[in-house]
Image: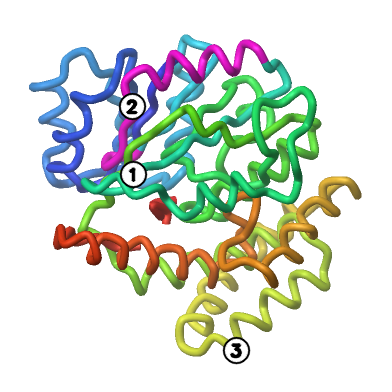
């Protein structure tokens, strides 16, 4: 198992999290200017540092997967890490379930170790448990709490430059499912996430809305695209800005558009329907439900405040997706 970490300008978080990772570890630095790369070279010589020289967003993880010499890769952000023994257990699960391409772990958020609300949604996925998978099937996952089968990940194209970052998981999840691969939530594999205070909540809301629309354009039927666009129009300034930002990426999304197999679209539609009964999108983080994502993040922040820790944090994924 190789741990692949992506980072950008979060030196202090990286210094705190890197010692917690079990080797081998690959860090892909998305063009940091805060001395992160120099610190890694000086203080963590066992870590393989990759410097693309620019910000690749979520695609930086693709580089790490290609370089990994192990069949499985555990993703982490600079403010997350895996619990002791979690990766050994994840490898056992992946070995025992050869169709499994993505294992979505249980995420414990902040010093209080609050279970990310997304986990309850995944555990209660209406997609059920398939006989050859280790837990409830999902069509979305938090990347900072995911283990992937490297060959399947790369065959599905990894993360892309249309979405770039934030909500990048859904398009990949849909394509893996379309290829017949499994994605499942496994509760006894645990990751920790201490969200960095260095965030722009408003900007992330815009990204979530923008990427929900782009994901729909990439893979969903046109009526779904229209629904997502209309939701953005009705959302006010955040939605309006997201539409403007989506417009600049629309030609690339259209060039790569393809529809899903009927069975996968039906599964995804069942998650859309479940939103009428739940606050968060069941089965994972559906890009179309960006308003639910924001609700999840607010609930996570409130949980921290109620615990009296005074921990500053921005939004997802539990919300760093």
| Mark 2 surroundings: few (<14), some (14-19) or many (≥20) residues within 10 A | some
Q: How is the image coloured?
A: rainbow
Q: Is residue 80 magenta?
A: yes
Q: Residue at x 44, y 51 (%)?
A: 321
Which residue lies under the disc numbered 3? 234
Circle 3: element type: helix
Q: Position of residue 236 (x, y in %)?
A: 50, 89
Q: Report the disc number at residue 83.
A: 2
Closer to the camera in the image, 109 or 222: 109
Closer to the camera in the image, 57 or 153: 153
Q: CA distance from mark 3 to mark 1?
A: 35 Å
The segment highlighted magenta reads: 77-96
Describe residue 270's horizontal placement relative to residue 228 as left or right.
Answer: right
Describe residue 222's horizontal placement relative to residue 80 as left or right.
Answer: right
Q: Earlier in the sequence, mark 2 or mark 1?
A: 1
Which residue lies under the disc numbered 1? 54
């Amino acid at each position: 198992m190789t741990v692949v970490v992506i980072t950008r300008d979060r030196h202090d978080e990286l210094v705190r999290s890197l010692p917690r990772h079990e080797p081998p570890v690959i860090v892909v630095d998305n063009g940091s200017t805060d001395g992160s790369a120099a610190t890694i070279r000086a203080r963590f010589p066992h870590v393989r540092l990759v410097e693309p020289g620019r910000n690749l967003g979520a695609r930086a993880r693709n580089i790490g997967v290609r370089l990994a010499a192990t069949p499985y890769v555990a993703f982490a952000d600079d403010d997350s890490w895996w619990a002791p023994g979690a990766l050994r257990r994840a490898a056992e699960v992946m070995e025992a379930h050869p169709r499994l391409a993505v294992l979505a772990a249980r995420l414990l958020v902040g010093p209080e170790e609050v279970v990310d609300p997304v986990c309850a949604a995944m555990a209660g996925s209406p997609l059920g448990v398939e006989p050859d998978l280790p837990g409830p099937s999902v069509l979305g996952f938090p990347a900072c709490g995911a283990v992937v089968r490297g060959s399947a990940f790369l065959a599905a194209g990894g993360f892309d430059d249309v979405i770039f970052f934030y909500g990048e998981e859904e398009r990949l999840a849909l394509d893996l499912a379309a290829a017949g691969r499994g994605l499942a939530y496994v509760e006894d594999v645990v990751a920790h996430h201490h969200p960095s205070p260095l965030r722009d909540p408003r900007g992330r809301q815009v990204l979530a809305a923008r990427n929900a629309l782009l994901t729909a354009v990439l893979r969903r039927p046109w009526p779904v695209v229209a629904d997502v666009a209309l939701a953005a129009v009705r959302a006010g300034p955040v939605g309006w800005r997201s539409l403007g930002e989506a417009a600049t990426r629309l030609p690339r999304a259209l060039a790569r558009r393809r529809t899903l197999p009927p069975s996968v679209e039906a599964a995804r539609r069942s998650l859309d329907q479940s939103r009428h009964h739940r606050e968060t999108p069941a089965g994972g983080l559906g890009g179309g439900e960006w308003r639910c994502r924001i609700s999840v993040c607010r609930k996570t922040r409130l949980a921290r405040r109620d615990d009296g820790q005074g921990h500053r944090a921005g939004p997802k994924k539990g919300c760093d997706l």
